[in-house]
Amino acid sequence: MPAFRQVESPFAMYAVIATGGKQVRVTEGQQVHVELLGAEQGATVNFTPVLVVDGDTVLATPTQLAGTKVSGRIVGSAAGPKIDGFTYKRRTNQRRRYGHRQHYQVVEITSIAKG
C-alpha cells in the first residue's frame, strides 16, 4: 500500500519568509528549522515576509507587504547532519580531517497577519 502525504488546501494561507539568508515557505502551526537567531527558548520572533498568499490574493510588492507580519515562537534547538571531510595531497604526507554540524533553532509559526 503506497504512503499518502497530506495535501494542503490550495486556498490555505501561507507566506514565504526570509531568515538566515534563505527563504522558507511557512503556514500557521508549522515548525521550521532556521539559523540561530540569538534568542532564548520561548521567545517570540518576527520575520519579514517576502510573499503572502491567502486564497486568490497574492501580496508580493513592498507596498502591499508594508503591514504584514509573520510571528513565531522558539520551541527548541536542533542539529543538522554531521558532515565529515578529508583532504590529502599524495606523496607529501599532507592530510587533514574535518567535521561540521550546523545548529538550528526550531520555530513554530504562530500567526500570519495581513496588513
Image: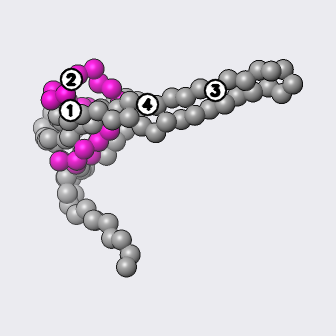
Which residue lies under the disc numbered 2?
40
How crowded pointer 4 is (Cα within 10 Å; few <14, some 14-19, many 20+) is rated as few
Which residue lies under the disc numbered 3?
97
Which residue lies under the disc numbered 1?
74
Q: Residue at x 23, y 22 (%)?
A: 39
The amino acid type of the residue labelled 3 equals: Arg
Please, what secondary structure does the residue beneath circle 1 have? strand
Q: Earlier in the sequence, mark 2 or mark 3?
A: 2
Q: Which residues are magenta?
A: 26-51
Which residue lies under the disc numbered 4?
102
Q: Decide: marks 3, 4 in contact (CB < 8 A)?
A: no
x%, y% of residue 114?
A: 14, 41
Q: Is residue 82 above or below residue 36?
A: below
Give the CA separation, mark 3 to mark 1.
Answer: 34 Å
* Residue 63 shows up from this direction: no
Q: Decide: marks 2, 3 in contact (CB < 8 A)?
A: no
Q: Residue at x 18, y 47 (%)?
A: 28
Q: Decide: marks 2, 1 in contact (CB < 8 A)?
A: yes
Q: Earlier in the sequence, mark 2 or mark 4?
A: 2
Residue 93, numbered label? none
Please, what secondary structure does the residue beneath circle 3 have? strand
Give the CA separation, mark 2 to mark 3.
Answer: 33 Å
Q: Is residue 93 left or right of residue 97?
A: right
- Viewport quadrant of the C terminus: top left
Q: Earlier in the sequence, mark 3 or mark 1?
A: 1
Q: Earlier in the sequence, mark 3 or mark 4?
A: 3
Q: Residue at x 66, y 31 (%)?
A: 86
Give the CA separation, mark 2 to mark 1.
Answer: 7 Å
